[in-house]
Image (spheres, grey):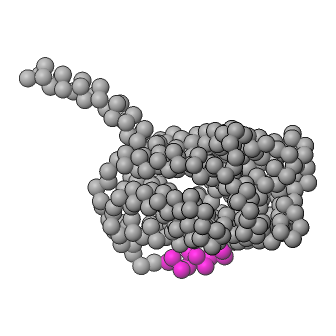
Amino acid sequence: MRQHAKALSSRIRFFLPIRGFVIYWRLSNLYFWFFALLGGLLPYWSLYLEGQGFSYLQIATLMATIQLTKIIAPSVWGWLGDKTGQRVRLVRFGAITGSLFFAGVFMEPGFYGLLLVMLAFTFFWNAILPLYEVITLRTLGTNKEKYGRVRLWGSVGFIGAVALVGGLLELVPIQNLPWLLLPVFAGIAVSAFLVPAERGERKPPAPKGSLKAIVTHPAVVTFFLMNFLLQVSHGAYYTFFSIHLEQHGYSKLSIGLLWSLGVFAEIALFLVMHRLTRHLTVRQIAIGALTLTMIRWILIAEVTDVVAVLLFAQLLHAASYGALHAISVQYIQGFFGKHHHGQGQALYSGLTFGAGGALGAWLSGFLVDGFSTSAAFWGGAAAMAIAIVITWRGLRPPPVHGED
C-alpha cells in the first residue's frame, strides 16, 4: 500500500511541471497571436489605405476606429464577463466574430463600407484582451508573479509579425496585406479554443461606495487628463508614422524594424521599472516621461533623415508608453481599490486609449491634409507641453493601499 502511495506521489510530482508548462503555453498562445495581429496591422494599415487611394483625412478616420471602439468595448464586454462569468466563451465569440467582420475588407467596400467593417471588427477584437487579462490572472491564481512571463509572448508576437510582414511586403504589393493577415486571424481563432476553461463564477456585487468621489478627485482628474493628452499626441504616431517614414525614403522592412525597436525598448523598461519606482516618485516619473515624449515627437518631425537620431527617438517609446503605462496601472489600483478596480481600468482604457487615441488620429489627419506629416508630430509635441503643465500642477501620489 505504501509503495503504491509512493509511486502515485512520484507520478503526481512528475506530471505537475508538465501540466504547468501546458497551461503556460495555452495562456501565452493567445497573447502571441493577438499582438501579432497588432504588429501586422498598426505599422502597415495606413500604407495599405494610402495604396487604396484614400485621402489623408479618410486614412485618419479609418485608423481612429481602432481606438474609437475602445471607448465602450472594454466596459460592455467586461460587464458581460462579470455578469455571466463566461469569459472564455466571450473571448471565443469575439475572436470568431471579429475575424468574420474583418473578411469584409476583401469586398473592397469603399470608404463608408470599410468604416463600418473596421468599427464592427474592432468592437469585437477590442473585447478579447480585457476579458483575457482576467482569465489569465484567475488561472495563475497565487502565481500572479508569472504574469510577465506569459504576457511577454505578446511582445514576441508583435515584433515577429512586424518583421515578417515588413519583409514580405518588400516582395509583394501592399494591396496583399489583408491576405498576409489571414494566418494570424486563424491563429487567434485556434488559440481562443485552447484557453483553459473557467468555472463560470460571477463577480460578487461591490458595496455602494465612493466611485463618484474617486472619479472627481482632483488628482484623478489630472491623471486622466494627462493620459488623454498622451494618447492624443500618439495619434500622429499610430496613424502616420509609417507614411512619414516612407516619404523620407525608408523601406517597408526598415519601417517595421523601427516599430519593433520601440517595443524592444518598452520591454527593457518594464524589466527595470521596479528600480525606478524605488528612487523616483510617480509625479517625477510622469513629468520626465512626458518631457521625453515631447522631445521624441520633435525629433521625428524634424530629424527623420538622420538614422541615429530616429533610432534614439524610437528608444524613447520606453518613456512615452512603457513608463507612463506602468505608473498608470499602479495609480488605478491605488485610487480605485479592489471593488472599483475593473471600472477604473475600463475608464482608463476608454477615456485615454479610446477617446484620446481616436481624437489624436483624427486631428493628425487634418494637420497632414493641410500641412504635412511633420506638422502632425509637432501637434503631438504641443499636446505634451500642455500635459506637462497640467501634471506639474495637479498630479499627486496615489494612496498606498487604495480606496474601496
Q: How many marks?
A: 0
Q: Tell me, yes or no, if residue 30 can be seen here.
A: no
* In the rendered image, the vertical position of residue 60 relative to residue 106, given as above or below: below
Q: Residue furthest top?
A: 3
Q: Which stretch is magenta?
A: 210-221
Pinpoint residue 16: horizontal percent, then vertical percent: 31, 32
| 175 displayed left or right of 192 | right
Pinpoint residue 205: horizontal percent, then vertical percent: 36, 72
User: 112 or 328: which is nearer to us?
Assistant: 112
* In the rendered image, the vertical position of residue 367 relative to residue 151, given as above or below: below
Question: In the image, what residue occupies the spot 56% across and 67% down?
Answer: 117
- Whether residue 309 appears in magenta in the rendering, the answer is no
* In the rendered image, the vertical position of residue 212 relative to residue 262, given as above or below: below
Pinpoint residue 109: horizontal percent, then vertical percent: 60, 67
Q: Residue furthest front?
A: 107
| 287 displayed left or right of 205 | right
Q: Main secondary structure of the magenta part?
A: helix
Question: In the image, what residue occupies the spot 33% across and 35% down?
Answer: 19
User: 137 or 398: which is nearer to us?
Assistant: 137
Q: Tell me, yes or no, if residue 203 can be seen here.
A: yes
Question: In the image, what residue occupies the spot 70% across and 46% down?
Answer: 173
Question: In the image, what residue occupies the spot 53% across and 72% down?
Answer: 72
Quadrant of residue 389 within the rendered picture: bottom right
| 268 displayed left or right of 184 | right
Q: Quadrant of the N terminus?
A: top left
- Whether residue 213 appears in magenta in the rendering, the answer is yes
Pinpoint residue 353: horizontal percent, then vertical percent: 63, 64
